[in-house]
Amino acid sequence: MSRPVAREPDWGSWLRSWDEQQESFNPSRERRFEAMLDVLAATQPSSMRVLDLGCGPGSLTARLLDRFPKARSTAVDFDPVILRVGQGALRRLATRITWVEADIGSEGWPRGWPTHRFHAAISTTALHWLGPDQLRRLHRTVAGLLRPGGVFLNGDYLPWARRDAGLGKIAEAVRKSKYGSLGSEWTGWNRWWKRLAREPTLRPLLQEREARFAHTRKSSRHLSVEFHLRSLRRAGFRDVGVVWQEMENRVVLARAGSGRP
Ligand SMILES: C[S@@+](CC[C@H](N)C(=O)[O-])C[C@H]1O[C@@H](n2cnc3c(N)ncnc32)[C@H](O)[C@@H]1O
């Protein structure tokens, strides 16, 4: 007797609903993406090679490759499920994306790759998963992966330091009055993962995901923007600063070595 063949998930729809739930955390998500891509447009060749760190299902990589048709992306994430969603949803861009499964918080990644340096490393809403030592190490690693003049761009919720708690409170009040109170976005995140867990073909990967993330810790408090800027300077970057922000939602830019002004 033949077993019923599991239906292929509708990957495109999973990516769309991912974007929706991410937008509920960050209503300015598209504007933040755009600001990052604007920096790339102004500083890098259109045939740039880009590293997307904590790429998720490839939301930023997709926008990058659509805007720059000669660009290529190496998209890195540690979550086998989210990578599967991205691979399924972005088949139309498959020849320009290299998906890499790696823990960017670990020591010794990337091992054995790449064979070239990147024009840019980009990341959104991902690096807050790393602790302070991991982030410092990542900054040093990225500095070594970029070409001279290459840029690192990190878009994330990067709070003011504790001593500027007053500014943090104002930012929180503005966020609340503009977008409503916090909480519902976590419902969206949890609901998304619960629904995805019902996809029979993903069961083995979901088990793998659980085992993997049992050992990595989500940091409870995001590291401050000052911490990021200081760590980037210490890693050897220059031209380090915030290039876009909406309250504590920011994009940090850092440039590697010497290159074009
Ligand atoms: C909130 S999602 C953001 C994904 C994507 N950048 C976006 O903006 O839609 C955070 C991503 O970081 C990834 N991540 C967290 N810790 C990681 C690590 N140590 N190594 C690689 N990826 C990691 C998660 O698996 C997840 O896909």
Image: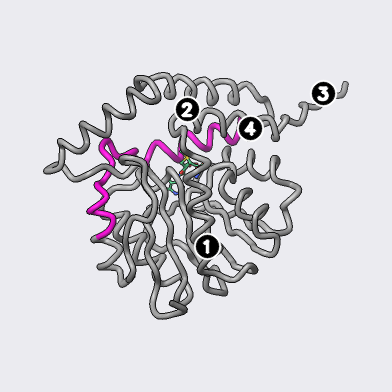
Q: Which residues are magenta?
A: 203-229
**Residue 199 visible within the image:** yes
Amino acid type assigned to the residue bearing label 3 in the image: Arg
Amino acid type assigned to the residue bearing label 1 in the image: Leu
Of callouts 3 and 4, which one flags the residue occurring earlier in the amino acid sequence? Answer: 3
Residue 168 lies, with reference to residue 93, above or below; the image says above
Front residue of 39 and 255: 39
What residue is rendered at 50% in x and 32% in y? 23
Of callouts 1 and 2, which one flags the residue occurring earlier in the amino acid sequence? Answer: 2
Front residue of 215 and 17: 17
- Structural crowding at the residue carrying mark 2, measured as other residues with C-alpha within 10 Å and reported as few (<14), some (14–19) or many (≥20): some
For this orientation, the residue located farthest to the left is: 163
- Look at the numbered disc 4 and give the secondary structure of its residue: helix
Q: Would residue 219 be counted in the magenta stretch? A: yes
Residue 18 lies, with reference to residue 48, above or below; the image says above
- Look at the numbered disc 3 and give the secondary structure of its residue: loop
Give percent across and percent down for residue 140: 34, 66
Which of label 1 and label 3 is nearer to you?
1
Q: Dividing the image into 4 quarters, which one contains the N terminus?
A: top right
- Structural crowding at the residue carrying mark 1, measured as other residues with C-alpha within 10 Å and reported as few (<14), some (14–19) or many (≥20): many
Q: Would residue 165 be counted in the magenta stretch? A: no
Q: CA distance from mark 3 to mark 2?
A: 40 Å
What residue is rendered at 72% in x and 52% in y? 93
Q: Are marks 3 and 2 in contact (CB under 8 Å)?
A: no
Which residue is disc 4 drawn over? 16
Which residue is disc 2 drawn over? 24
- Structural crowding at the residue carrying mark 4, measured as other residues with C-alpha within 10 Å and reported as few (<14), some (14–19) or many (≥20): few
Residue 40 circle label: 1
